[in-house]
C-alpha cells in the first residue's frame, strides 16, 4: 500500500505579515486535496500569525534547539514552536548543516527533542555534487541517517525523512528517476533495519527543485512519499499544482 503523501513547503527566510494572505490561500486550496497532507514550514517569527491565519492547517518551523530552555541566545526550543502554534518542524536541512555547522549528532538531538515535544519531524539528508560524482551518494546518505535518526520512534509524533541532494536545491537540477529510486530504496531499507516494520510507515520525501512541471514524474517513483518544496512553495499558483500532482 503506498503511503499517504506529504507535501511540505519550506519558506526558508521568506515571509512577512504581508504574506499571510498567501498562506490563507494555500491552506484553503490544499483542502481541495483531502488525500494529501500539506504543511508549510515558515520562519519562526511568522509561526504564531500563520497558525492563527489558517486554523487547522499544519504550520511548522524550520529548526529547533535540542534543549527545552536555557542560555542559548537566538534559538527556539521545540516547546516554544509548539506554544507558537507549530505542529511540525524541519531538522537537519543542508543549509543549516553547512552554514550553522550542525553535525549529525546535533540533528539527532534536535529530532529527538522535537518528537518528545510532539512535533512531527522532517529530517533532511543529502549528498554534495562532489560525493555524487565520485559514486558515494548512497553510502554517504545512509551514514548520515545512521548518525542523525532518532534512537527510537515515539508515539504521538511522526517522523519523515527528506532526501535532498544539496546540488539539486534551488538549482533547477534534479536526479534521474533511477537515482531517486535507488536512494529512496536504500533509505527505506535502512529505516526497516533500524525500526522494524514501523520503518515501512515513515514517509520519505524528495526535495530539491520540485516544481509543477516535474512533480508528477517524481511522485511516480517508488518510495517517494511526498516532497519538501522550497522556492515553488512560496505562492499558491506554484505550490498547489504540486499538491494536485501528489493527489493523483
Ligand atoms: P528548492 O528547495 O525546492 O527551492 O530547491 C528545497 C529545500 O531546500 O527544501
Image (tube, rainbow, N blue to C red):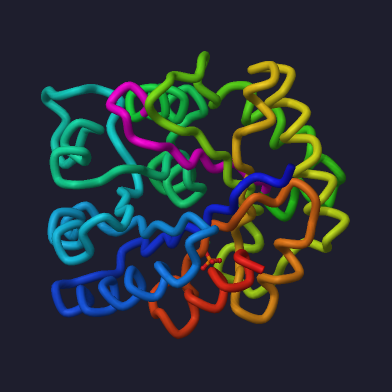
Residue 137 picture quarter: top right
Residue 120 falls inside the magenta stretch: yes
Looking at the picture, tell me which residue is in the foreground, 196 or 211: 196
Position in image of residue 133 (x %, y %):
83, 53
Position in image of residue 142 (x %, y %):
71, 30
At x 60%, y 34%, the residue is 202
At x 78%, y 28%, the residue is 189
Residue 28 picture quarter: bottom left
Q: In screen coordinates, is 240 left or right of 133? A: left
Looking at the picture, tell me which residue is in the foreground, 95 or 146: 146
Residue 30's place in the image compared with 18, above or below, is above
Residue 176's place in the image compared with 105, above or below, is below
Total tally of numbered discs in the picture: 0
Q: Quadrant of the C terminus?
A: bottom right
Q: In screen coordinates, is 173 left or right of 124? A: right
Looking at the picture, tell me which residue is in the foreground, 201 or 174: 201
Q: Residue furthest bottom?
A: 237
Position in image of residue 94 (x %, y %):
51, 48
Position in image of residue 60 (x %, y %):
32, 50
At x 61%, y 69%, the residue is 210
Q: In screen coordinates, is 142 left or right of 48? A: right
At x 54%, y 26%, the residue is 148
Q: In screen coordinates, is 151 left or right of 191? A: left
Q: Quadrant of the N terminus?
A: top right
Residue 53 falls inside the magenta stretch: no
In the image, which residues are magenta? 115-127
Residue 115's place in the image compared with 180, above or below, is above
Amino acid at each position: 500500500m503506498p503511503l499517504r503523501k506529504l507535501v511540505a513547503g519550506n519558506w526558508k527566510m521568506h515571509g512577512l505579515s504581508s504574506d499571510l494572505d498567501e498562506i490563507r490561500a494555500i491552506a484553503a486550496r490544499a483542502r481541495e486535496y483531502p488525500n494529501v497532507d500539506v504543511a508549510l514550514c515558515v520562519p519562526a517569527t511568522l509561526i504564531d500569525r500563520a497558525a492563527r491565519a489558517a486554523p487547522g492547517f499544519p504550520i511548522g518551523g524550520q529548526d529547533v534547539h535540542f534543549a527545552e530552555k536555557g542560555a542559548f541566545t537566538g534559538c527556539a526550543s521545540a516547546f516554544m514552536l509548539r506554544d507558537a502554534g507549530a505542529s511540525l518542524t524541519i531538522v537537519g536541512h543542508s543549509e543549516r548543516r553547512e552554514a550553522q555547522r550542525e553535525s549529525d549528532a546535533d540533528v539527532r538531538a534536535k529530532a529527538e527533542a522535537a518528537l518528545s515535544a510532539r512535533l512531527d519531524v522532517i529530517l533532511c539528508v543529502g549528498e554534495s555534487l562532489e560525493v555524487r560524482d565520485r559514486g558515494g551518494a548512497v553510502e554517504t546518505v545512509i551514514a548520515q541517517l545512521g548518525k542523525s535518526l532518532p534512537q527510537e520512534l515515539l508515539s504521538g509524533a511522526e517522523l519523515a525523512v527528506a532526501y535532498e541532494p544539496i546540488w539539486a536545491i534551488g538549482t533547477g537540477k534534479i536526479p534521474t528517476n533511477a537515482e531517486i529510486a535507488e536512494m529512496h530504496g536504500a533509505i527505506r531499507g535502512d529505516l526497516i533495519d533500524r525500526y522494524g516494520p514501523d520503518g515501512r510507515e515513515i514517509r520519505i520525501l524528495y526535495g530539491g527543485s520540485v516544481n509543477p512541471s516535474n512533480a508528477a514524474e517524481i511522485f511516480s517513483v517508488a518510495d517517494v512519499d511526498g516532497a519538501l518544496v522550497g522556492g515553488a512553495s512560496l505562492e499558491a499558483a506554484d505550490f498547489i499544482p504540486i499538491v494536485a500532482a501528489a493527489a493523483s
